[in-house]
């Protein structure tokens, strides 16, 4: 996934590990966005056994992660040097690993890639787990061949459900169980030359007890591995913390193995009949088994490890006769109950349908097809599973049910832009998809509460249950209300329209010192931030207040001026005097008794 460099934080003067993502990931915007979120989540894990995430970012196309530098080596290096660890050492390592995983599980983060390469052992002996969340970020890039490589590269540790693209805390528990098995035995429980074979083994085979591989493993440690590696996630400890509690029980030797899976009715038990002296020299460790005859007997369980009781010499020939008789009977029974009536189902998983049919025909078997299923591992058109499974028994000429793969389960992200969040949830559910992270942004084109964008975008093919991140509109972006007080109504309307606001006159009144149509007040006030498209309410002036015009007819010019001036009017004199001037007002406009704005002009005619 990345190249890792040792670098120096020049601001704090410390050595750091710089992980630079491979170009195939860095060029994918969906991966970069998801990687950033996973890095933020990983940075929120506070535990001494977790490698600290210092920073994350992108520079000139390079997506990087700045992490704590741990001088030392990986658990893989230690296993390569020692081969395996003794049980005490293995438990000493798994405990801090589980403590780190529990810290992640507590905040809802699943590691998904627990393996020796991600367990660091410092020079001071401290153990730290690294790369939280990176597997999920890569797995969310389904169209990338590199993301498939991530799955393939860690198949030896993957829980059965992860082959279907599903993972939770119990998946980390399973991987931890495999990790513990490898530390105890020096090998993983399943080996295969290809990832498909490994996936099949994880899904269909139980992990063996470590004590069957190497000696010196206590039963309680066998039980610990068995508890962690149950194929059914519900049968495992619920998270790393629950498994950590079982580690302490295993140390005390009190942990019991999980309850066995009930046998199906058609399973046959095996009766082992020893034939003395056949094959191995007397007294050898294998002497009791060398000449054994196996007879399938339904419902009978015989302990082959119990030493035979000493018998008197006089009964030896009788016992030998009985044994020979049983051996002869076993030969006939073996035909009817075992190999004679049955054949083995050939390996048909992972091959094309026609090739599988040919293999079955060679064994004299017939076939039929069951309902096809999705698979992240088996390509479309190849056999996903068979019933009975490969290696199982089927009667001669019997029928094997083949299930073909439909390839990876993929769905196209539907068009969600313009839908409400509820509508988007319903539409995604119709395609087995779910809503991931949601955020809100202002928009000039999408109404409030409607989806602006989705990530991945519409038309992208994603896995079932994939999380689709949505950006929902908060409506139009806010704008700052300008001041329109003292402006004429028309000018105020133009200024508000320029920033995307409406205007509405909600009142009018007279006011001294103003002109008619002038804005007296506004709501909201200037400087307030409001949503674009909002309305600003204004009160407009009717001009100065109206007062009654005094009647100045027949008054002298001087008296008339004084009277009008006292009431706040301006006076204009129209002198009509020609020859003989009396200086008396004979006419006025407006007339006395009329209402006129205070400060307006009154014209008087004088003769």
Image (cartoon, rainbow, N blue to C red):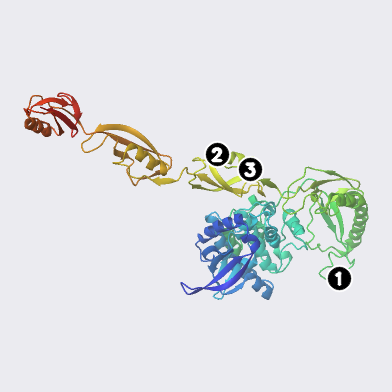
Residue carrying label 1: 282
- Residue 129 lies in quadrant: bottom right
* Label 3 element class: loop
- Residue 30 lies in quadrant: bottom right
**Picture coordinates of residue 571, whole percent (x, y):** 15, 33
Q: How many marks?
A: 3
6 or 313, nearer to the observer: 6
**Picture coordinates of residue 567, whole percent (x, y):** 13, 32
Q: Quadrant of the C terminus?
A: top left
Classify 295 as above or below 442.
Answer: below
What label sits on residue 414 in the rendered view? Answer: 3
Is residue 221 visible from the viewing direction of this image?
no
Classify 279 as above or below 508.
Answer: below
**Picture coordinates of residue 28, whole percent (x, y):** 62, 57
Asked whether, in this view, residue 268 is left or right of residue 548, the answer is: right
Is residue 407 visible from the viewing direction of this image?
yes
First in sequence, mark 1 or 3: give its number: 1
Q: Quadrant of the N terminus?
A: bottom right
Q: Residues within 10 Å of mark 2 (few under 14, many from 20)?
A: few
Asked whether, in this view, residue 275 is left or right of residue 14, the answer is: right
What label sits on residue 422 in the rendered view? Answer: 2
First in sequence, mark 2 or 3: give its number: 3
Look at 75% across and 55% down and name the residue there.
200
* Label 1 element class: loop
């Amino acid at each position: 996934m990345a190249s890792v460099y040792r670098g120096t934080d020049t601001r704090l003067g410390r050595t750091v590990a710089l992980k630079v993502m491979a170009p195939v990931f860095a060029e994918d915007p969906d991966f970069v966005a998801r990687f950033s979120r996973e890095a933020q989540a990983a940075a929120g894990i506070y535990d001494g056994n977790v490698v600290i995430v210092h920073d994350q970012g992108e520079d000139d196309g390079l997506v990087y992660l700045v992490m704590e530098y741990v001088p030392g080596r990986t658990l893989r290096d230690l296993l390569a040097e020692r081969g395996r660890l003794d049980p005490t050492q293995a438990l000493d390592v798994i405990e801090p690993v589980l403590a780190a995983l529990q810290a992640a599980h507590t905040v809802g983060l699943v590691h998904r890639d627990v393996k020796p390469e991600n367990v660091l052992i410092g020079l001071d002996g401290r153990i730290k787990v690294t790369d939280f969340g990176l597997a999920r970020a890569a797995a969310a890039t389904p169209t990338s061949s590199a993301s498939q490589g991530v799955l393939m590269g860690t198949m030896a540790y993957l829980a059965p459900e992860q082959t279907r693209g599903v993972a939770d805390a119990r998946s980390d528990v399973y991987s931890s169980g495999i990790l513990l098995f490898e530390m105890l035995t020096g090998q993983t429980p399943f080996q295969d030359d290809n990832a498909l074979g490994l996936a099949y083994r994880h899904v269909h085979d139980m992990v063996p007890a470590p004590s069957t591989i190497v000696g010196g493993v206590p039963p309680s440690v066998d039980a610990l591995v068995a508890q962690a590696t149950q194929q059914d996630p519900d049968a495992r400890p619920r998270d790393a913390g629950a498994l950590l509690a079982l580690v302490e029980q295993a140390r005390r030797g009190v942990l019991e193995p999980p309850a066995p899976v009930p046998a199906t009715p058609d399973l046959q038990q095996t009766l082992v009949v020893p034939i003395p002296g056949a094959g191995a020299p007397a007294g050898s460790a294998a002497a009791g088994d060398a000449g054994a005859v196996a007879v399938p007997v339904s419902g009978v369980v015989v302990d082959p490890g119990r030493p035979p009781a000493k018998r008197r010499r006089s009964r030896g020939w009788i016992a030998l006769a009985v044994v020979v008789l049983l051996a002869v009977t076993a030969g006939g029974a073996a035909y009817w109950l075992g190999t004679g009536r049955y054949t083995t189902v050939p390996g048909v998983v992972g091959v094309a349908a026609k090739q599988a049919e040919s293999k079955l025909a060679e064994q004299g078997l017939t076939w039929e097809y069951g309902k096809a299923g999705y698979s992240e591992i088996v390509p479309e058109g190849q056999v996903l599973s068979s019933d009975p499974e490969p290696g199982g028994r089927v009667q001669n000429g019997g029928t094997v049910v083949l299930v073909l793969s439909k390839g990876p389960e993929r769905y196209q992200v539907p068009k969600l832009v313009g839908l409400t969040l509820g509508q988007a949830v319903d539409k995604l559910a119709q395609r087995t998809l779910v809503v991931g992270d949601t955020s809100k942004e202002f928009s000039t084109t999408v109404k409030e509460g409607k989806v602006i964008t989705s990530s991945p975008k519409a038309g992208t093919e994603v896995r079932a249950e994939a999380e689709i991140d949505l950006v929902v509109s908060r409506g139009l972006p806010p704008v700052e209300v300008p001041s329109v007080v003292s402006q004429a109504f028309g000018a105020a309307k133009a200024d508000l329209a320029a920033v995307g606001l409406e205007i509405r006159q909600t009142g009018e009144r007279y006011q001294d010192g103003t002109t008619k149509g002038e804005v007296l007040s506004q709501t909201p006030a200037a400087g307030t931030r409001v949503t674009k498209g909002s309305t600003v309410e204004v009160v407009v002036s009717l001009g100065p207040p109206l007062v009654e015009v005094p009647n100045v007819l027949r008054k002298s010019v001087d008296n008339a001026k004084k009277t009008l001036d006292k009431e706040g009017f301006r006076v204009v004199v129209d002198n009509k005097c020609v020859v003989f001037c009396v200086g008396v007002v004979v006419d006025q406009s407006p007339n006395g008794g009329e209402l006129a704005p205070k400060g307006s002009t009154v014209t008087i005619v004088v003769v």
